[in-house]
Amino acid sequence: MELETTIASIGEQIASAGIHAHEQTLRTMASAAKRFAPGAAEALTDPTLADALRHRAYSVVGAALTRNLDRGQSARLADSVNGLTPVSSAA
């Protein structure tokens, strides 16, 4: 799966299940984006920030990754995050 498609799919999942259900995915993406968008990468993984700020950071990180990773790096990241399972929130 292409990285752009993966990022869009995760974005839809975040919108429906909430950002906190995807912490492992967000950490993986932030780690890959640290050198391209360090502030957004840090914000993306900070659970103390408001969800709206983390959603914005997700957009910035996603754009940085699609702009800066080569095809091989993009494929490896997409494969990596596609294998992660969202965490259900306890009711």
Image (cartoon, helix red, strand yellow):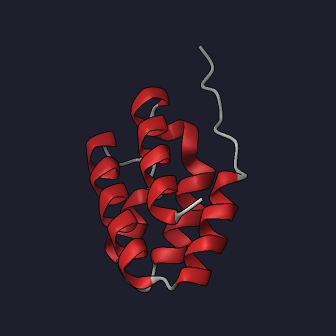
Q: Position of residue 22 (x, y in %)?
A: 56, 44
Residue at 66% in and 73% down? 76
Q: Count the numbered circles shown.
A: 0
Instruction: Tell which of 20 and 10 is nearer to you.
Output: 10
Instruction: Tell which of 51 and 86 is nearer to you.
Output: 86
Q: Position of residue 60 (x, y in %)?
A: 30, 65
Residue at 43% in and 74% down? 65
Question: Which image quadrant: the C terminus?
Answer: top right
> Eyeballing the image, is 8 above or below 15?
below
Instruction: Tell which of 36 and 7 is nearer to you.
Output: 7
> Eyeballing the image, is 30 above or below 8?
below
Left or right, residue 59 beside residue 14: left
Left or right, residue 23 beside residue 48: right
Q: Position of residue 39 (x, y in %)?
A: 33, 73
Residue at 38% in and 66% down? 61
Left or right, residue 62 beside residue 91: left
> Eyeballing the image, is 62 above or below 69?
above
> Eyeballing the image, is 54 above or below 63?
above
Question: Which image quadrant: the N terminus?
Answer: bottom right
Instruction: Tell which of 91 and 32 is nearer to you.
Output: 32
